Amino acid sequence: MGCRARVWIQAELGSNGKMRFFANSNFEISRDFCFFLVWVLDGAAPEEVMKITTEELVEMNVGVARKERSRVNTWHNVLITK
């Protein structure tokens, strides 16, 4: 939504009950931001992942909330994609 980058993400529930994430993108900067999300969330419990909010992403100082071209929006779009 609102971005030309395509992001492919795969989420799996590991045998230990923790989430595993894999991501790629056709744009390098989006790929790097997705890598950071994977790094932060990989190995988290599903409940922890579901609780992540856009406001928490803003606290990581990666963009400005509610701005059209913010990287926070990229992360939010990746998180809400099914």
Image (cartoon, rainbow, N blue to C red):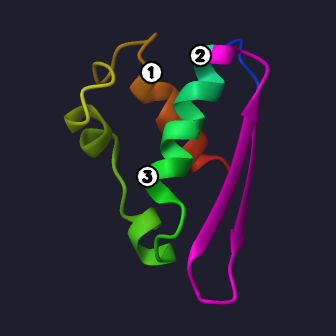
Q: Look at the image and give the residue range highlighted in magenta.
A: 8-28
Q: Is residue 41 magenta?
A: no
Residue 76 % position (x, y):
48, 38
Against 82, residue 69 (above or below) is above
Residue holding disc 3? 40
Query: Can I make out residue 2 in this image?
Result: no
- Pointer 1: what residue? 71
The disc label shown at residue 29, or none: 2
How far apart are the alpha carbons under marks 1 and 2?
9 Å
Point out the image quarter for the C terminus: bottom right
Which residue lies most toward the left here? 59
Residue at image point 59% right, 16% down: 29
Mark 2 residue type: Ile
Residue at x 58%, y 36% (from the top left corner)? 34
In which quadrant will I find the N terminus? Answer: top right
Image marks 1 and 2: residues in contact by CB distance under 8 Å: yes
Residue density around tag 1, few if under 14, some if 14–19, many if 20 or more, within 10 Å: many
SS state under label 1? helix
Residue at horizontal 71 percent and vertical 17 percent from the top: 5
Looking at the image, which is closer to me, 76 or 34? 34
Distance from disc 3 to disc 2, alpha carbons, whole Å, reads 17 Å
Q: Of callouts 1 and 2, which one flags the residue occurring earlier in the amino acid sequence?
A: 2
Image: 67 above or below 79: above
Residue type at mark 1: give it.
Answer: Arg
Q: Marks 3 and 1, Cα distance to the nearest angstrom?
A: 15 Å
Question: SS class of the residue under badge 3?
Answer: helix
Q: Image quarter for residue 30?
A: top right
Residue 25, quarter of picture: top right
* Relative side of 80 to 57, left or right: right
Q: Which residue is at a point 46% across and 10% down the rendered structure image?
A: 69
Q: Earlier in the sequence, mark 3 or mark 1?
A: 3
> Do the residues bearing badges 3 and 1 touch, measured as CB atoms within 8 Å?
no
